[in-house]
Image: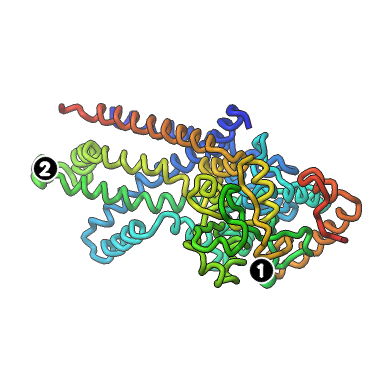
């Protein structure tokens, strides 16, 4: 197989990886904030349910979660799966998992804000919502960016787990081509692709951090 | 300012995602072997056409039965048979690469119609609804040519690798005395990993299908040999979900037809240089 064709095939796989990556971020970043609120809720029932959810998501492998999300509907509830569910299941699995991690990062950021700021905002007549979105959240985002970047970079590499439910992402293709070509080239190209992908992510994150460093 | 930046980023991500979906979704159902990498993505529109598709599940790391060819398309002996059979069934062939360890779940849940992939019947008779066998196979050991292993007895104290959930693994399970002499039995994710282990010296022998072994050795051009003593002889068939006799019977008739009119022999000769199929012989 010529190198150009190899790159073209792996690029097709890369598109699938990018789709998983992007959709996961779009859904899990906001969901993570909701989960963080649930985790900090005053209501003990809600708080403990969310705590349990986070502990399951962090305490079991993502690979296992993907299999449960994909095969669970049939094996637990007897629902016949449609062909298109495969990719959707992958997204659901990734989103649920990553939302739990993001939630804890958000919580760490939110709880690190000094109480004095809330008191000052109250004195100045800010409502609770206003306080959170105008004063607290912007500072939280600044603080948690490095931790979020860590997770996002991990996500890029975790997309390779999707093949456990037969989603043909880049690494599954690289393995298949390596098996047929009996050489290491597909792995090297896949490695370069992952590296470039993560380089872009790290670059974007750095640019974002710079944007947010308006007080320094 | 921040909000704008976040909005721009979100839009950029969305566009990337859409690009990812659409470019891989539009070619998910194809005729014959022109499958592609993205056949899993965004094919919701397929439900209506489900009756007319023939979804073949296969391990894409399994040359010469099913693998990625030099032109980047899925190819292989079994897949060529499947393409011909689908044509005669008047159905659209969908090639669905699967994680081999998940094949039962894929079949049970109806994501694939059959497993057609050098699929060994022996030992699995009661787990699937099978066609008649179409090819003989043996489970053998592959070793490095310069190694001192020439019989099964020489494997004592050696490290042996086998693919997870393969029929070689099943055959070894039936021979606990032999396995007990090994230094270690390693389970590999796929044959390629196992053979890379063998070539690099990490393991001393790989237990696998003879047909696949011969192809791999020729293709790799490396100094590997197949031991003469085999551990099991067996037959390949097409496996359907238990109880799916209707589709099985249809396929069985077509396989016999393909054997009778010489199509099967022709495909076999193209892949193996001779007719090694067993239907109608």
Q: Secondary structure at mark 2?
A: helix
Q: Nearer the viewer, residue A39 or B59?
A: B59
Would you name the residue on which mark 2 appears? A117
Could you say which quadrant of the image residue B21 lies in? Answer: top right
Q: Tell me, yes or no, whether the two marked residues, 1 and 2, touch with CB atoms within 8 Å.
A: no
**What is the x, y in percent for residue B204?**
53, 54
Give coordinates of residue A121: x percent, y percent. 12, 42
Q: Which mark is residue B124?
A: 1
Q: Residue at x 68, y 62 (%)?
A: B120
Is B3 placed left or right of A81 in the picture? left
Q: Are the residues flagged by discs 1 and 2 from a single subunit?
A: no
Q: Quadrant of residue B241?
A: bottom right
Q: Nearer the viewer, mark 1 or mark 2?
A: 1
Pick the residue in front: B33 or B63. B63
Residue count near mark 2 (Cα–Cα under 10 Å), binned few <14, some 14–19, many ≥20: few
Chain holding disc 1? B
Instruction: Give the camera-side residue of B146 and A100.
Output: B146
**Does A113 sit above or below residue A213?**
below
The quarter of the picture where residue A59 lies is bottom left
Is the image coloured rainbow, by chain, by secondary structure, or in one colour? rainbow
Q: CA distance from mark 1 to mark 2?
A: 68 Å
């Amino acid at each position: 197989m010529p190198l150009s064709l190899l790159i073209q095939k792996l690029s097709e796989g890369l598109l699938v990886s990018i789709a998983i990556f992007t959709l996961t971020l779009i859904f899990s970043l906001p969901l993570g904030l909701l989960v963080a609120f649930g985790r900090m809720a005053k209501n003990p029932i809600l708080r403990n349910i969310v705590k349990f959810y986070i502990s399951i998501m962090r305490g079991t492998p993502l690979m296992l979660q993907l299999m449960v999300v994909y095969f669970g509907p049939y094996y637990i509830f007897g629902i016949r799966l449609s062909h298109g569910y495969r990719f959707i299941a992958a997204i659901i699995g990734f989103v649920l998992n990553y939302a739990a991690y993001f939630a804890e990062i958000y919580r760490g950021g939110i709880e690190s804000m000094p109480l004095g700021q809330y008191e000052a905002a109250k004195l100045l007549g800010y409502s609770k919502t206003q306080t959170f979105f105008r004063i607290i959240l912007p500072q939280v985002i600044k603080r948690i960016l490095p931790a979020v970047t860590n997770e996002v970079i991990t996500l890029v590499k975790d997309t390779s787990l999707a093949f456990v439910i037969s989603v043909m992402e880049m690494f599954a293709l690289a393995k298949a081509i390596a098996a047929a070509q009996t050489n290491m080239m597909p792995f090297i190209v896949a490695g370069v692709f992952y590296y470039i992908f993560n380089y872009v992510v790290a670059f974007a994150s750095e640019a974002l951090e710079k944007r947010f460093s308006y007080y320094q | 300012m921040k909000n704008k930046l976040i909005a721009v980023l979100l839009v950029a991500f969305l566009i990337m995602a859409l690009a990812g979906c659409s470019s891989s979704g539009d070619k998910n159902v194809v005729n014959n072997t022109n499958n592609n990498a993205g056949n899993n993505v965004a094919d919701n529109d397929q439900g209506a056409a489900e009756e007319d598709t023939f979804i073949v599940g296969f391990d894409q790391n399994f040359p010469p039965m099913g693998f990625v060819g030099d032109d980047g398309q899925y190819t292989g002996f079994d897949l060529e048979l499947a393409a011909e059979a689908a044509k005669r069934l008047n159905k659209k062939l969908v090639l669905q690469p699967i994680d081999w360890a998940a094949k039962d779940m894929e079949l049970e849940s109806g994501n694939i119609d059959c497993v057609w992939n050098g699929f060994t019947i022996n030992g699995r008779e009661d787990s699937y609804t099978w066609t008649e066998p179409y090819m003989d196979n043996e489970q053998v050991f592959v070793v490095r040519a310069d190694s001192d292993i020439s019989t099964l007895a020489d494997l004592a104290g050696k490290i042996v690798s086998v693919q997870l959930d393969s029929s070689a693994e099943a055959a070894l399970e039936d021979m606990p005395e032999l396995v007990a002499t090994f230094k270690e039995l390693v389970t590999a994710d796929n044959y390629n990993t196992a053979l890379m282990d063998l070539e690099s010296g990490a393991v001393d022998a790989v237990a696998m299908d003879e047909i696949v072994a011969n192809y791999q050795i020729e293709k790799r051009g490396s100094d590997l040999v197949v031991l003469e003593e085999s551990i099991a002889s067996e037959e390949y068939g097409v496996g359907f979900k238990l109880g799916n006799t209707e589709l099985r019977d249809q396929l069985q008739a077509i396989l016999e037809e393909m054997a009778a009119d010489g199509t099967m022999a022709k495909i076999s000769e193209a892949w193996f240089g001779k007719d090694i199929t067993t239907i109608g012989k």
